[in-house]
Image (tube, rainbow, N blue to C red):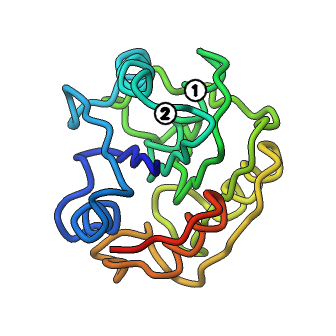
Amino acid sequence: MNINVPGLRNSGPGHWQSIWETNYPAQFYRITQTNWEQPDCQQWTTQLEKELSSFNLKEVVLIGHSVGCATIVNWHYRFGKQIKGALLVAPSDVDDPNYPKYITGFSPLPLRKLPFPSIVVASTNDHVVAYERAKYFAACWGSELVTLQNAGHIEGKSGYGNWQAGLELVSKLSGETIVA
């Protein structure tokens, strides 16, 4: 199962996570949070752990966007669970001194090698994370790095709606073809 872990404001209807869930409902599931406007690491990782309890983690690929990536990494180091893989798209730099103060508890971001396959997708002009920082995260986590030129924050308003290349990365991690 492919499980979306959205970031701030829950990835709206034009976001690739939402489109994938609509187009492939049997293959994508969304984690729900109680407060999408003020992400809190303790609450978000607890909710992720709670919802994952009904899945076979050996078959789970977590797909994070923005602070959803920080949620996945913090969840792993908090609970120590093994999954099939993780796609970490436009990971937020929660350690940046200018990072929004209403997003709490995610810093310091764990920067140890992840014990499962992972791919970091980074844009050369993301306003949420400098490309060099995303590249550094990928190196620390032992992740494959996929670089997108001038892709903004890799979201709907950046032109990433039904993001076919992203689906191919999910398939790479899961070993399964995404079909409607």
| Residue at 65 percent of width and 65 percent of height | 131
Is residue 104 visible from the viewing direction of this image?
no
Residue 73 horizontal/vertical position (percent): 60, 34
* Residues under numbered marks 1 and 2 in contact, where contact means CB atoms less than 8 Å apart: yes
Residue kind at label 2, given as amino acid type = Thr
- Label drawn at residue 74: 1
Q: Position of residue 95 (x, y in %)?
A: 59, 35
Residue 65 relative to residue 176: left or right = left
Q: Is residue 51 above or below residue 90?
A: above
Q: How many marks?
A: 2
Residue 127 image offset from top left, x and y in percent: 46, 63
Q: Residue at x 65, y 47 (%)?
A: 85
Decide if residue 60 is in sight here.
yes
Q: Nearer the viewer, residue 45 or 116?
A: 116
Distance from Cα at disc 1 to Cα at disc 2 = 5 Å
SS of the residue at dot 2? helix
Quadrant in the picture for the C terminus = bottom left
In the image: residue 70, left or right of residue 82: left
- Res 21 → quadrant: bottom left
* Residue type, label 1: Asn
Which residue is rendered at x = 60% and y = 69% of the image? 169
Q: Secondary structure at mark 1?
A: helix
Q: Badge 1: how crowded within 10 Å, few (<14), some, or many (20+)?
A: many
Q: Which mark is residue 71?
A: 2
Residue 85 numbered tag = none
Residue occupying image coordinates x 26% and y 71%:
23
Residue 112, compared with residue 42, is above or below; it is below
